[in-house]
Amino acid sequence: MRAYISGIDVLHQVQDGWLRLRFLTPAAMAWRDKNLDGFDRAGIHNDVLVPLLVGSTFLDLMRSEGLTCIRCVPPDVSYRDDGSVILFWFASEKAQQWAAENLAEPVTEFAGAVVVEHRYAGPLLEGLERDGLRTLERP
């Protein structure tokens, strides 16, 4: 989940039967500390994991207190410009199938990513988006 989105207090994402909540603003963090103190925190952003069954109740409470909450949909494909090449990670099953059908063999892989020269990256991104895959550039 990206952590810096203007005007958004809380991002939420369903993950393996849990609702992952990321609190972005001081007001949201204060709400978290007041209301979710007993829940486990995860990752470098101190995300809070709550059981999916009660997650909607917490979202309703946050919204009723004026916090803006949005659902974070993970990308099918993420990519990063690494200088001389661009690295593409095909995360979803749909993206992996797309890669198998559309990338010319042999592909070069590094750290779980497909390595692509700059001249091919633009057309690759256009094809992914044309076919309805969600992409996200990594910092």
Image (spheres, rainbow, N blue to C red):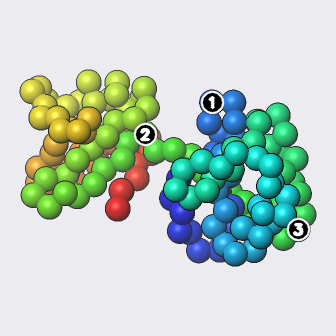
Quadrant containing the C terminus is bottom left
Amino acid on which the number 3 mark rests in the picture: Glu
Element at badge 3? loop
Query: Badge 3, how many Cα within 10 Å: few under 14, some, many 20+?
Result: few
Element at badge 1? loop
Quarter of the rendering containing residue 84: bottom left
Q: Which residue lies under the disc numbered 2?
A: 76
Q: Is residue 125 left or right of residue 86?
A: right
Q: Where is residue 43 drawn, in percent x and y?
A: 54, 50
Residue 132 vertical placement versus 139 (above, below): above
Q: Which residue lies under the disc numbered 3?
A: 65
The alpha-carbon separation of the residues under discs 3 and 1 comes to 28 Å
Q: Where is residue 94 drawn, in percent x and y?
A: 42, 28
Q: Nearer the viewer, residue 50 or 105?
A: 50
Element at badge 2? loop
Residue at the spot x=54%, y=63% of the render?
3
Amino acid on which the number 2 mark rests in the picture: Asp
Q: Which residue lies under the disc numbered 1?
A: 16
Query: Badge 2, how many Cα within 10 Å: few under 14, some, many 20+?
Result: some
